[in-house]
């Protein structure tokens, strides 16, 4: 996607062919800064501190982390070390495990001198594949948007939570890809953007990227969605996911479940954009997904730009009040109208997913 007319992905290789470059998402929307990663430890820190975030991008970043490790030392010991360290960088997004398992299976049988180039090649392939997957999610979601008859007025109103746009992936996004394609196709579409406390990925990232692409949008407090649905101001909800079980339970940013409940109560379709590496075929129940508990400081403080233009962080809570910060929740499959994947649209159920991914059926 473009930033001020210049095409960008979220992660790419510098002209030296070794350094990995990423957009620092912790500084958006106030500053657009590109970071250089020269060592595997830079990638680990970048994922852990959310310089890069979003399930598909976390997978791509981990793949390049393995490549950086192999550039430094292609030994068996480093292969194991990098796999272990990167795997521990964030717990929820299953794309991390998917990418690391993929790289490890590719590299382990190779002689050490062959590992560096093979790792860089595969990381680049994973990035290209992610961009193409997201483009196809966009096409498949566009088919759904074309069928929507707006409940009020002329425009189609979408509601999204957190950031599952191009910043969460390599390009296009998952939840936002259909919205970009609808906008580009001339469909009048407007997006209600949940601010998504506590880290505000909606207010900081989704609003920023929609604005850069010229998509009409309005940022709302996380608590406003149910009210807007009651007033026919939302035609459909669409979110991404960090891990979806083989039975269609959707783990996503905290607060997604509440939106799905409100959508269900108001007969508003609730869609989830989903690339195949985000499906955890090893799990049936969403309750078995480990949920990341992030720092209480994300709840007790907030950062923003002052009138003077400086970025400042302020305290919100009375001194001594504790805060808790579960970062994800699970929306049960029964509340999800459909999953929108690169292979098509399906029911949020094992049968639905297997209709698109029949190779994942268990042997009878
Ligand atoms: O904690 P984050 O910002 O990495 O979480 C990302 C999300 O939960 C997004 O909502 C997104 O849908 C999943 S990635 C496409």
Image (tube, grey):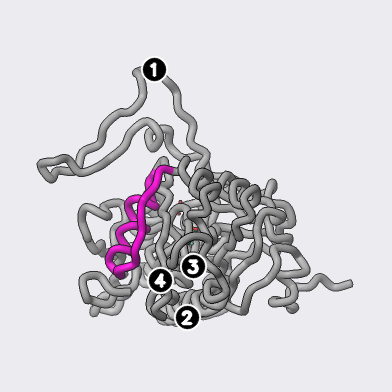
Query: Is residue 269 in view from this perspective?
Result: yes
Under 8 Å from ligand 1: the CB of mark 3? yes
Whether the residues at callouts 2 and 4 have beta carbons within 8 Å, the answer is no
Q: Residues within 10 Å of mark 1 (few under 14, many from 20)?
A: few
Which quarter of the picture shows residue 181? bottom left
Tell me which label, 2 or 1, sits earlier in the chain. Answer: 2
Which residue matches tag 4? 188
On the question of residue 112 being in view, the answer is: no
CA–CA distance in space, label 2 to label 1 = 49 Å
Tell me which segment is drawn in magenta. 199-221
Q: In the drawing, what numbered circle is on residue 132?
A: 2
Q: Nearer the viewer, mark 4 or mark 1?
A: 4
Tell me which label, 4 or 3, sits earlier in the chain: 3
Q: Residue beneath label 1, please? A: 320
Q: Circle 4: is it few (<14), some (14-19), or many (20+) Cα within 10 Å?
A: some
Q: Estimate the x, y position of residue 277 in percent, counting from the top left.
A: 58, 69
Of the image marks 4 and 1, the number of the one nearer the N terminus: 4
| Residue 196 horizontal/vertical position (percent) | 43, 46
Tell me where residue 103 appears, x and y as whole percent.
Answer: 52, 72
């Amino acid at each position: 996607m473009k930033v001020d007319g210049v095409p960008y992905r979220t992660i790419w290789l510098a002209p030296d062919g070794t350094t990995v470059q990423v957009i620092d998402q912790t500084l958006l929307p106030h500053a657009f800064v590109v970071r250089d990663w020269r060592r595997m430890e830079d990638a680990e820190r970048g994922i852990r501190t959310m310089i890069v975030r979003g399930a598909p991008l976390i997978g791509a970043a981990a793949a390049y982390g393995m490549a950086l490790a192999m550039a430094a030392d292609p030994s068996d010991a480093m292969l194991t070390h990098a796999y272990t360290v990167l795997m521990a960088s964030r717990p929820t997004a299953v794309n991390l495990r998917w990418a690391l398992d993929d790289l490890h299976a590719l590299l382990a049988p190779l002689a050490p001198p062959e590992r560096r180039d093979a790792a860089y090649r595969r990381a680049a392939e994973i990035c290209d594949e992610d961009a193409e997957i997201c483009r196809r999610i966009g096409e498949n979601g566009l088919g759904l948007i074309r069928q929507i008859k707006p409940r009020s007025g002329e425009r189609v109103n979408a509601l999204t939570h957190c950031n599952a746009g191009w910043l969460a992936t390599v390009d296009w996004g998952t939840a936002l890809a259909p919205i970009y394609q609808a906008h580009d196709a001339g469909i009048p579409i407007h997006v209600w953007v949940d601010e998504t406390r506590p880290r505000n990925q909606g207010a900081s990232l989704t609003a920023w990227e929609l604005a850069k692409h010229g998509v009409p949008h309005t940022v709302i407090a996380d608590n406003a969605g149910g009210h807007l649905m009651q007033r026919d101001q939302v035609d459909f909800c669409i979110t991404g996911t960090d891990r979806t079980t083989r039975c269609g339970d959707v783990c996503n940013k905290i607060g997604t479940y509440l939106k799905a409940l409100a959508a269900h109560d108001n007969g508003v379709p609730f869609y989830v954009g989903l690339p195949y590496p985000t499906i955890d075929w090893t799990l049936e129940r969403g309750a078995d997904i480990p949920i990341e508990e992030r720092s209480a400081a994300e709840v007790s403080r907030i950062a923003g730009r002052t009138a003077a233009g400086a970025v400042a962080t302020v305290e919100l809570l009375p001194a001594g009040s504790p805060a808790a910060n579960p970062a994800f929740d699970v929306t049960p499959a029964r509340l999800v109208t459909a999953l929108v994947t690169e292979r098509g649209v399906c029911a949020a159920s094992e049968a639905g997913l297997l209709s698109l991914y029949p190779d994942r059926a268990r042997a009878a």
